[in-house]
Image (cartoon, helix red, strand yellow):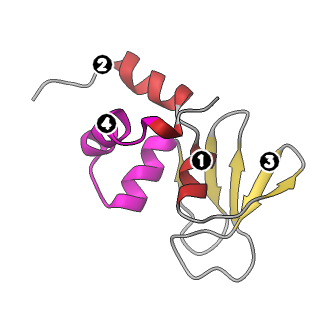
């Protein structure tokens, strides 16, 4: 199987908004300094523990799951798929979520 070109991975990380991916899973955000916070959809969350840094397009859960990363990591976690499959999903299915 051929490697995914670095340019493809970097383009997805830059163009697809992790905030919009989270909002598609019904995460409601509130502004918190330069970041936004919401309830993590990956575990039972009574208080906001999901932090998204829009300027860097990164996310991190400060709660039970301690997960985080890029849009690719988000898709891997939310869909339960491999890195390659997450990239393919982002290329094919998530184009409406491209950052403005």
Report the label total: 4
**Magenta stretch, residue numbers:** 71-95
Q: Secondary structure at mark 1?
A: helix
Q: Secondary structure at mark 4?
A: helix
In the displayed structure, does residue 56 sit left or right of residue 26?
Answer: right
Q: Position of residue 66 (x, y in %)?
A: 57, 64
Q: Earlier in the sequence, mark 4 or mark 2?
A: 2
Q: Which residue is mark 2?
A: 5
Mark 1 or 2, which is nearer the eye? 1
Q: Which residue is mark 3?
A: 35
* Lower sequence index among marks 1 and 2: 2
The residue to which callout 4 is attached is 92
Residue 94 image point, x, y percent: 42, 41
Q: Earlier in the sequence, mark 3 or mark 1?
A: 1
- Tell me the element at label 3: strand
Which numbered marker is on residue 53?
none
Could you tell me how far apart the alpha carbons at marks 4 and 2 are, in whole angstroms? Answer: 16 Å
Dot 4: within a 10 Å radius of its alpha carbon, few (fewer than 14), some, or many (20 or more) residues?
Answer: few
- Whether pointer 3 and pointer 4 mark residues with C-beta atoms closer than 8 Å, the reply is no
Give neighbour class at mark 2: few <14, some 14-19, many 20+ (Cα, 10 Å): few
Residue under the point 62% across and 55% down: 60
Q: Which mark is residue 20?
A: 1
Distance Cα–Cα, label 3 vs label 4: 28 Å
Q: Is residue 100 above or below residue 5?
A: below
> Can you tell which of label 3 and label 4 is closer to the viewer?
4
* Among the 4 quarters of the image, the one containing residue 54: top right
Give the mark, 3 or 4, whose residue is nearer the N terminus.
Answer: 3
Q: Nearer the viewer, residue 29 or 2?
A: 29
How crowded is the residue under tag 3: few (<14 C-alpha within 10 Å), some, or many (20+)?
some
Q: Dividing the picture into quarters, in which one does residue 8 lie?
A: top left
Q: Main secondary structure of the magenta part?
A: helix
């Amino acid at each position: 199987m051929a490697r995914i070109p670095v340019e493809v991975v970097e383009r997805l990380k830059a163009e697809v908004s992790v905030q919009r991916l989270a909002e598609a899973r019904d995460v409601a955000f509130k502004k918190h300094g330069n970041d936004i916070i919401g309830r993590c959809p990956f575990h039972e969350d009574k208080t906001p523990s999901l932090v998204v840094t829009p300027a860097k397009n990164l996310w991190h859960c400060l709660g039970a799951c301690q997960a985080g990363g890029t849009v690719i990591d988000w898709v891997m976690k939310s869909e339960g798929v491999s890195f390659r499959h997450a990239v393919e999903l982002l290329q094919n299915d998530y184009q409406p979520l491209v950052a403005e």
